[in-house]
Amino acid sequence: MEQTVSYTLDSTLETVDHAEESATRIATELGFAEDEIMQISMAVREGAVNAVLHGNAYAPDKKVVLAFERTAEDLVITIRDQGKGIDLSGIPNPLAPENLLKTSGRGIFLMRSFMDVVEIRPSQTGTEIKLIKHVRGTSAAGKEGSQ
Amino acid sequence: MSMKLSTRQVDGVTIVDCSGRITLGEGSVMMRDTVRDLLAKGNKKIILNLGDVNYIDSSGIGELVSAFTTTKNQGGELKLLNLTKKVHDLLQITKLYTVFDVKEDETAAVKGFK
């Protein structure tokens, strides 16, 4: 059974909370374990923060589109913003000793730590983040697909 | 649950009891303001008791780092107390666990200040 649900949301902090709460609810309904639910909700929260804060920069005329899709093997979460895009090469490694005491720059790292696959790419309107978590009992191919 | 902070003094050390969520927005701002206020008033021995913090995001992690470095830069010392498993795991993943001075016992943490 495949199901998709999507939300078009304002660029606000409330959207970040809504995204996290939706992820928690959907992951719970899909039967993920407690620690996986925490990982999924946190990854979605970080993706939403990225879209609202860094992508759309809280612009009232820009929207965030959040979609959850249950495929045969995965929970696929897509977060799209209408910002100017991310230069991934410009994001320093937060685990490098010289960056450990920086106060920002850990969001994408946390998404990659918690999800099986993370894809970040330009969309037609801004940036699209795709977060994939394998449903328990299906392929656990690991993070080789992370970009 | 939003964030709540309360402070108390024990043997010259300020303990900030934190509960709820340290996340982008109100939680992070409260943490920042509280630590800056303490430092401005000369309270430079600070313990953040995170025993009742049930959620923290990357912004909250950044705020802990900021509190740590701001205190250190002003000649003070900041310790973390009573990490929940979630916060503990996050600090491990981000390699910050060994950067912070993390304690599990309040009395020992208070006595551990120079």
Image: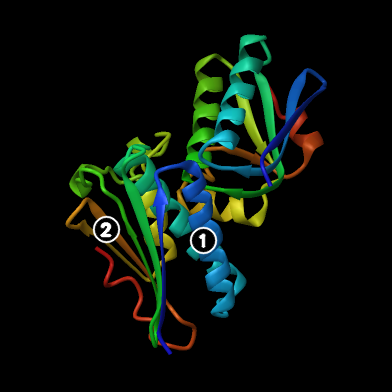
Relative to A138, is B50 above or below?
Answer: above
Task: Quarter of the image for the C terminus of chain B: give it.
Answer: top right
- Identified by mark 1, the residue type is Ser
* Residue A106 makes an appearance in the image: no
Q: CA–CA distance between discs 1 and 2? A: 17 Å
> Toward which corner of the image does residue B14 lie, by quadrant?
top right
Q: Secondary structure beneath disc 1? A: helix
Residue B95 position, x and y percent, is: 46, 48
Mark 1 or mark 2: name the one nearer the start of the chain: 1
Mark 1 lies on residue: A41
B114 or A36, which is in the foreground?
Answer: A36
Mark 2, Cα crowd under 10 Å, few <14 / some 14-19 / many 20+, is many
Mark 1, Cα crowd under 10 Å, few <14 / some 14-19 / many 20+, is many
Mark 2 lies on residue: A128
Residue A138 position, x and y percent, is: 42, 88
- Identified by mark 2, the residue type is Glu
Q: Is residue B3 left or right of residue A21?
A: right
Residue B4 position, x and y percent, is: 71, 36
